[in-house]
Image (cartoon, rainbow, N blue to C red):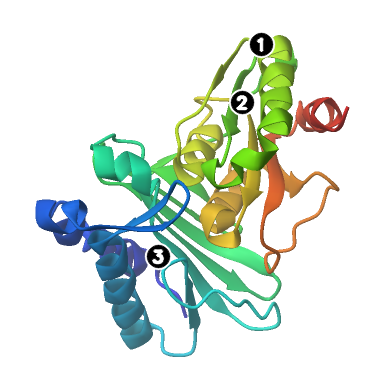
Amino acid sequence: MMNMEQLIKIVKETDSIFFDEQLRADVTKKGDADFVTRADYEISEYLHRRLTETFPDIGFISEEGDTAIDETKDYWILDPIDGTTNFMHGLSFCAVSLGLYSGGDVVAGVIYIPYTEELFWAEKGKGAYLNGKPIRCSKNKHLSDCIGILEFNPYFKNDCRAAMDHALKIYSSCQDIRTFGSAAVELAYIACGQADVFLGRYLKPWDYAAGLCMIKEAGGVMTNLDGEVHIGKLNEHMVASNAAVYEEFCALIKS
């Protein structure tokens, strides 16, 4: 049986890796605008070992390792550092993001932002929390009152016109727009009501697994543009918001 206190302790143990300047500076380019640091690999390997020791019956999927997901099995779904480009430049918007997929749903999630010492966690049926205090999505009922977040995804610059169209729709309809460069951080901020609506372009499950649980437990909604969630699919456009503006926001994005 999973113990959230134990899980949070394991995630926070990655601090010594995250703040190792030599590991941060050891950078490999995987593709256009796609980088990985030695810290990414070290955190992935460390959490794989610790989670397997502690929860031996649960599989493990990481961005920096095995990426095939069988939706009939139980998995930890990890992004060791979501927002690697931010991390490389010393920007605070990067996080360790860990979700537990079980029984066809993400049933637990931890999003840890080491630079700001913000620890978000959620467990199915038990709510969502920031540093131990309960959090909820915002209560805004109109997009004109909302802060919107768009995660552009720099790996798909060939689709930049569509990305800019999405940005224009959100900017024109909402109070203002933000982009932080880390879907995990952005979803955590939606869950605690610091922003209201989110569109993440071409997301992979490790980008949003923990955030999915967080949003739902904080009273929000998160789906793809068809109103569904397929955790095994790659490169999905995902929307998240409070329940009051979800339909309006989806209609805006699809218009």
Front-lying residue, 196 or 80: 80
For the residue marked with disc 1, what is the amino acid?
Asp
Q: Residue furthest bottom?
A: 57
Image check: 182 left or right of 127? Answer: left
Q: Residues within 10 Å of mark 2 (few under 14, many from 20)?
A: many
Residue pointed to by mark 2:
196
For the residue marked with disc 3, what is the amino acid?
Met
Disc 1 or 3, which lies upstream in sequence?
A: 3
Instruction: Describe the element under mark 2 as helix, strand or loop.
Output: loop
Label 2 – label 3 distance at C-alpha: 27 Å
Cβ atoms at labels 2 and 1 below 8 Å apart: yes
Q: In percent of the image, x 71 and y 27: which residue is there?
A: 166
Per the rendering, the mark at residue 145 is 1
Per the rendering, the mark at residue 4 is 3
Q: In percent of the image, x 34 and y 70: which residue is there?
A: 44
* Rendered image quadrant of residue 12: bottom left
